[in-house]
Image (cartoon, rainbow, N blue to C red):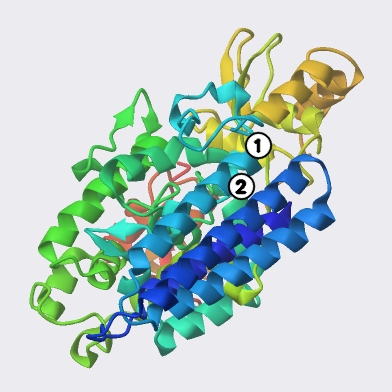
Amino acid sequence: MPILRRLLLGLCSVLLAACTQLPPRAAQVNEAAIDAILVDVKSAAELGETGLAAYAAGDAEAAAAALTAAREALSATAGRCASTPGCDIERVLAAQDALAARQTQVLLGLLSDNESVEDATPIEERNEEAESPLLTTLPETARSTALLKGQELRKLITVNEPVQAALEEWLTWMRPFLLEAHENYQFMRYRMWPEYEKAGLPEALLFGILAKESGAKVHAVSRAGASGPLQFMYYTGRRYGLAVDNGFDQRFDPTAATRANVAYINDHLRIFNNNLELVLGAYNGGEGRMQRLSSKGAKSFWDPQVFNRLPPETRDYVPMVLAAAWLFLHPEEYNLRFPAVDARPGEITLTRASSLNELAVCLGQQGNARGWFRTLRNLNPRWEPGDRIAQGTRLELPAIAAQAYARTCQDGALTTLAAQLSAARKPKVPAAPARVAGSAGSAGSAGGQTHVVRQGETLSSIARKFGCGNPRVIAIANQIKAPRYAIRAGQRLTVPSCRA
């Protein structure tokens, strides 16, 4: 199957390349050459049909050979048409699109033996339960020609040196992170992609942001407090409708976060004259700063007066997002193979009270070599891993995992073991007494102590050591200013007697 997938993707990339390299039309039309090209297109299409018939008959080797020959013939024909005076490239592309559609439908199992492409039921109208698992692993042709405000995304991404450097990072030490992000995304794609699709935004952009922001981990939280799969700061999230719902922060909901991300992207495309790099820079570094530096979109993100004055994080962020989006569109060009997963959505109704941790233990690696913990968390973000979830509660998880639950997790030894492990608690070791440097002087007379700050300590951790409910009492005693409450190793702090 990977061979057939590469053939289809190769066909699409060849067609796009031919379409973008058309020479000026010559005045004289060569009818004989054009007729020969059209005959060759028809022959190549018939060869493709032969390959698909071989695939349907189970002869993968013959299918691969025929489809490879068809792809090469179509590639050569498209090139000849592009350089032949009077050849209408649209006719060639239309024939190739028809073959590509037929290939997609057959590979996905959506056509019967006697059904034509025109007779095929549209994918979106088919019963979801009957979909082939390949529907979520074979990229749609539209993904390679994704549009952003009427322009092809591949034409908007400038593969300059910063983006090339980012490509190298994704393809070397960060390759495992990229593959994991793609796998995580596939399992929750049905919760996120429809929001982009409705807005007419390219899926590659969603994946690029997701890969860089969180690795497609719903509960990611940055040091600065940005939260969720698309890493919204609290007030930005509130501005775009991400509220706190019965104690649940909607920044962690993949659907709500994607909807907010779509609104943000569209708002700022208008502000920045549809300049994608500036929008991404604003998403990471703040729209106010980006508007000032770019003169509200008049200057490019790569303009030295903009780029050189941005924080290092933003200078890194934008190329990394663009590179991840580019790899999503063109993995085969970089010897990259994203993992194929059966991501059909499903759900279970708990037959006994359980936690996500228990379910992850019980499900093990049935259907997923990495196990199901991350996917359980991503699809059920309102529950913490150790929360006891009542019998009768519905949970979302991939259909293949739901089948495993029915087989092994409703009762039996694995459920008992999972419950025992969940009930186990690590022993608590009494905290070591805080290091105190003297107790005399003004601090001692006031009933307090002097503490020497250790490497890695924060005001909050020191407050906990001394029984102070709020670190502000120590901050006030030492004239440490909010909001950072910055302290340094070796600094002497006066600590009030909070336990008194």
Q: Which residue extends farthest front?
A: 32
Give the percent coordinates (x, y) of residue 452: 51, 71
At label 2, counting other C-alpha atoms closer than 10 Å, the crowd grade (few under 14, some 14-19, many 20 or more) is: some
Query: Which residue occupies the foreground of this view, 117 or 42?
Result: 42
Question: How far apart, in angstroms, are the residues tagged by discs 2 and 1?
Answer: 7 Å
Could you tell me residue 329's position as x and y percent? 49, 64
Residues 82 and 160: in front is: 82
User: What amino acid type should be assigned to the residue bearing mark 2?
Assistant: Thr
Q: From what the image shows, is residue 209 above or below residue 355?
A: below
**Residue at numbered disc 2:** 137
> Can I make out residue 304 in this image?
yes
Give residue 124's quadrant in the image.
top left
Q: Residue 133 bears which disc, if any? A: 1
> Farthest bottom residue?
304
Vertical position of residue 107 compared to residue 75: above or below: above
Circle 1: element type: helix
Q: Residue at x 27, y 81 (%)?
A: 310
Residue 463 appearing in the image: no
Mark 1 surroundings within 10 Å by alpha-carbon count, few (fewer than 14), some (14 through 19), many (20 or more): some
Of the 4 image quadrants, the one containing the C terminus is: top left
For the point 49% across and 79% down, the residue is: 166
Per the rendering, the mark at residue 61 is none
Q: Give whichever of 420, 144 is nearer the camera.
A: 144
State whether residue 158 is above or below residue 353: below
x, y percentage for residue 6?
65, 61
Q: How far across and how far down the image is residue 276, in percent?
A: 26, 68
Q: Are marks 2 and 1 in contact (CB under 8 Å)?
A: yes
> The residue under label 1 is which amino acid type?
Pro
**At x 30% / y 76%, what residue is drawn?**
86
In the picture, measured across the screen, residue 6 lies left or right of residue 249, that is right
